[in-house]
Amino acid sequence: MDSRFRSVPSGYHRLNALMEMYGDLNFTVLGFSCNQFGLQAPEVNHETLNILKYVRPGAGFVPKFPVFSKVEVNGLNEERLFTYLKESLPFVNPVIGDLKKFYWSPIKVNDIRWNFEKFLITADGMPFRRYDLHCPIEKVEKDIADLL
């Protein structure tokens, strides 16, 4: 396992490490802030980079990937990109989590379940694989390497 992943405290750091590993190739991470999961991202768009740097994950963190404006990834106002990704890559064994922490309606079986769910898209724009929050980063890394 790459040493950059051994004691990494957050998903943000893991995404930076992926950019360090593959950023010189035909690869990039795209970050989208969303407040639909436990209301964990209440900041407004112009505050996002400062929140990342000073609060979560903090300690001077600077993303090495583009971070886009806040979006809704589920429900009536979800961005079409996420509608497309969820339709293209449905869950194999869908499990709905704690509904009290979900802030959208209607709730659908293929909805994104929590922050840091990932979608891998090929260089020609085709959805390739979907990873839940608990997927080991090594699996994502292997799939990226296989595609590149």
Image (cartoon, grey):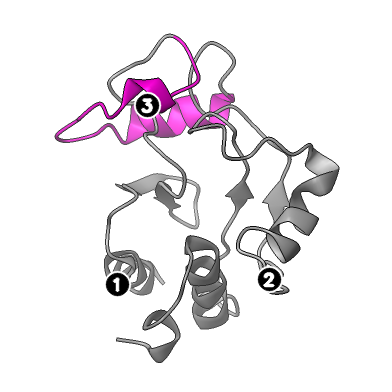
Residue 59, image x and y in percent?
68, 74
Q: Taking 128 as reference, is 140 above or below it?
A: below
Q: Position of residue 121 (x, y in %)?
A: 44, 51
Q: Residue at the left extreme?
A: 93
Is residue 69 or residue 121 the one in the foreground?
A: 69
Q: Which mark is residue 80?
A: none
Q: Which dot, 2 or 1, sits closer to the camera?
A: 2
Report, in whole angstroms, how far the alpha carbon at label 2 lies from the one at label 1: 22 Å
N-terminal of the pair, mark 2 or mark 1, is: 2
Residue at image point 59% right, 27% down: 72
Mark 1 lies on residue? 138
The residue at the point 28 percent across, 31 percent down is 90
Disc nearest the viewer among 2 and 3? 2
Residue 77 appears left or right of 139? right
The residue under label 3 is 111
Question: Which residues fall within the magenta stretch?
Answer: 79-105
Q: Amino acid at mark 1?
A: Glu
Q: Give the labeled residue for mark 2.
A: 61
Quarter of the image with the N terminus is bottom left
Relative to residue 54, is residue 107 depicted above or below?
above
For residue 35, side relative to residue 70 (left or right): left
- Check the picture and name the quadrant holding the C terminus: bottom left
